[in-house]
Image (cartoon, grey):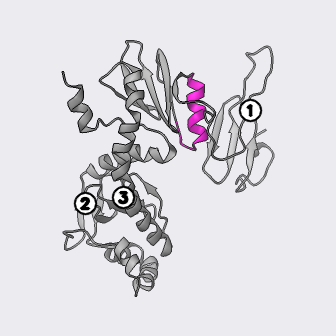
């Protein structure tokens, strides 16, 4: 039975794995702190009861023993793969075929629609592709990964420095897309093009207050972290560099209502899946585009 049916304290314990049935509603949870497996329930419709299995490891690859190649998958296998990577997924799309392309340790997933169109999968989202031949994408995976990965590594390096600096003053430092969190409301946007930073306060995705620099943001919203910032920045050039100002800083905090930073962040987030060995965005290198023209 689930925790709520037998324990007075409903707060799950860190590091524990919980397994239950009883509710007839399948559920899975994994936030890196604790894990709940309640997704093997079969209800009353099956004559023969059976048990599936689950992994204790918090990060695993169910296709690790597969050779390079093109494979057809079931919906369940695709969901299990993402679960092993600790990436949330909702996948209810209809398809005629689901392909996994594995090449040199990297994975790419393609969906063939009932009408024949081919799309690349990014979790539960998809984007239509120009070519309908799966082999075309398998043959070019290495080129596309290299084309995306090389500039992304420099961007990721800058983000990690910023994340470490934020953690050093007591902030979150969580990286997602082009954004590094200070806390739930305060963030730093890293421009993917010139690598400059924009500190901002955002009560929602539309209303954002942009600050001229990091100290101004902390003074206004987190005076406790501002004190830590002053201690760290004193005589620490590397720390100061990680939180450098924008090239053209705004003079005072300004309200910004556009959502372009989130669009840029979503594109970066797709590319960042390469850190999980998943190619979820297809960007043709210029040489390929020229080569494929008739």
Mark 3 Cα shell of 10 Å, populated few (<14), some (14-19), many (≥20): few
Q: Nearer the viewer, residue 4 or 290?
A: 290
Extent of the magenta region: 74-89
| Residue 182 seen | no
The residue that appears at 31% across and 76% down in the rendered structure is 216
Cα distance between the residues tagged 2 and 1 = 47 Å
Residue sitting farthest toward the bottom: 235
Q: Residue 53: give its label.
A: 1
Q: Return the residue at label 2.
A: 194
Secondary structure of the residue carrying tag 2 is loop
Residue 124 vs 56, above or below: the answer is above
65 horizontally vs 266: left or right: right
Q: Residue 154: give its label.
A: 3
| Residue 268 seen | yes
The residue that appears at 41% across and 22% down in the rendered structure is 135
Residue 94 vs 164, above or below: the answer is above
Residue 75 vs 152, above or below: the answer is above
Mark 2 or mark 3, earlier in chain: 3
Cα distance between the residues tagged 2 and 3 = 11 Å
- Residue 203 on the magenta span: no
Cα distance between the residues tagged 3 and 1 = 40 Å
| Residue 274 coordinates in the image, percent (x, y) | 45, 44
Mark 3 or mark 1, earlier in chain: 1
Residue 70 vs 103, above or below: the answer is above
Most frequent secondary structure within the magenta stretch: helix
Secondary structure of the residue carrying tag 1 is loop
| Residue 289 coordinates in the image, percent (x, y) | 23, 32
Mark 1 Cα shell of 10 Å, populated few (<14), some (14-19), many (≥20): few
Q: Quadrant of residue 281?
A: top left
The residue that appears at 33% across and 43% down in the rendered structure is 147
Q: Nearer the viewer, residue 139 or 232?
A: 139
Q: Nearer the viewer, residue 126 or 5?
A: 126
């Amino acid at each position: 039975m689930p925790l709520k049916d037998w324990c007075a304290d409903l707060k799950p314990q860190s590091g524990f794995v919980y397994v239950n049935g009883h509710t007839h509603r399948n559920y899975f949870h994994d936030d890196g702190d604790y894990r709940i497996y309640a997704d093997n329930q079969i209800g009353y419709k099956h004559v023969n009861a059976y048990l599936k299995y689950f992994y204790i490891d918090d990060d695993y690859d169910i296709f690790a023993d597969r050779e390079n190649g093109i494979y057809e998958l079931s919906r369940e296998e695709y969901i299990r793969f993402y679960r092993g990577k600790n990436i949330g997924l909702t996948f209810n799309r209809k398809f005629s075929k689901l392909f996994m392309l594995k090449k040199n340790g990297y994975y790419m997933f393609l969906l063939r629609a009932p009408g024949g169109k081919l799309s690349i999968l990014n979790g539960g989202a998809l984007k239509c592709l120009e070519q309908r031949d799966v082999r075309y994408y398998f043959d070019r995976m290495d080129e596309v990964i290299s084309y995306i990965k090389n500039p992304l590594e420099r961007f990721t390096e800058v983000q990690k420095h910023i994340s470490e600096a934020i953690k050093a003053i007591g902030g979150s430092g969580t990286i997602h897309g082009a954004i590094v969190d200070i806390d739930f409301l305060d963030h730093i946007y890293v421009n993917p093009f010139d690598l400059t930073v924009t500190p901002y306060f955002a009560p929602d995705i539309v209303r954002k207050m942009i600050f001229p620099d990091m100290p101004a943001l902390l003074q206004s919203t987190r005076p406790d972290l501002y004190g830590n910032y002053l201690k760290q920045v004193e005589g620490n050039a590397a720390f100061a560099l990680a939180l450098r100002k924008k090239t053209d800083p705004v003079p005072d905090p300004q309200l910004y209502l556009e959502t372009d930073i989130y669009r840029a962040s979503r594109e970066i987030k797709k590319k960042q899946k390469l850190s999980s060995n998943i190619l979820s965005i297809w960007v043709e290198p210029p040489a390929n585009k020229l080569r494929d023209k008739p």
